[in-house]
Image (cartoon, rainbow, N blue to C red):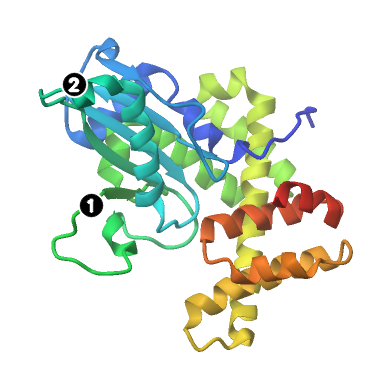
Amino acid sequence: MENVTLRRSYKDVLFRRVFRDKESLLELYNAVNGTHYADPEELMVVTLEDAIYMNVKNDIAFLVGAYLNLYEHQSTVNPNMPLRCLFYITREYEKLMDKASLYSSKLQEIPTPRFLVFYNGKRGQPEHQTLQLSTAFQTEEEPPELELRVTVLNINYGKNKELLKQCKKLEEYALFVDMLRRNALKYSIEEAARRTVDECIRQDILRELLREQRAEVIAMSIFYYDEEKELELIRKDEYELGQEAGMQQGMEQGMQRGAALTIIKILMDLGEVPDQVRERLLGETSEEQMDKWRRLAVKARSVEEFLKAFE
């Protein structure tokens, strides 16, 4: 197999590469919104490459007319996307606006935000759903003083057929992922990745991208599949450990404790785990933070290596 170094960021990078050029991104925008923009220069990409929340970058941000669009790709179900988008949009507005003008008596107009997540994970999800920031509020208010809505579209092949029909690149991306999963049932993931790339080139699916970046896309595909499988196993382990924990506050908290126990179990295989680390893990309530620590534990070669990143 081609010698390609895998990076943790490979998981969603293929989606970003498919829609890197303005023509493809404008086609996707038109398909989603039922618009007919024809000039790619009417689109301005404003993705913040340093906009990182819990080591996750904003995928694509761009301006079209009076709208600021934040597009994300997800292969796992994430109910925290409204909060993440809130952080992203704040950074975007900080970049776009002159801070001094905020003290002016004149109203400063800002582009209207739109938040969209393209989901293609293996867990069954509706074709279309809306996530709301207010769902996370500890106290329910009607109406909430702050709200942010994120539209989630299921782009697994066979879902949202009309949308995929309207955007050829999106349909080809869905076909690629579907073919990779089917091939992985019959071959090793390395062989499945090679076969998928070669089959897609023959069938004119993402042909230009795959021919130009064949080796790297194969590496991306291997990482994508391995991480999907790893997350499935870890989630199952967490669920079982969460049940064993028997926390009275409910299964959600039990699963959170199960996540901490999973990390501790991994670390114990590497060496002695300090008491303060155990306490911090068991007291954590953020799913995003727990995911970060879990990945660090899986990658670590020793407890000491984990602790350096843990702090």
SS type, badge 2: loop
Q: Nearer the viewer, residue 10 or 62?
A: 62
Q: Residue at x 76, y 31 (%)?
A: 5
- Please give the label number shown on residue 147: 1
Quadrant housing the N terminus: top right
Nearest to the eye among marks 2 and 1: give it: 1
Q: Quadrant of residue 221?
A: top right
- Give the x, y percent position of residue 86: 34, 44
Q: Is residue 220 visible?
A: yes
Position of residue 224 relative to residue 16, above or below, is below
**Amino acid type of disc 2?**
Gly
Q: In the visual, does 7 lie left or right of 228?
A: right
Residue behind mark 2: 65
Q: Nearer the viewer, residue 42 or 50?
A: 50
Q: Going by the picture, which residue comes out furthest to the right?
A: 271
**What is the CA distance from the residue labelled 2 to the residue labelled 1?**
23 Å
Q: In the visual, does 122 lie left or right of 192?
A: left
Q: Residue at x 58, y 88 (%)?
A: 246
SS type, badge 1: loop
**Sooner in the amino-acid sequence: mark 2 or mark 1:** 2
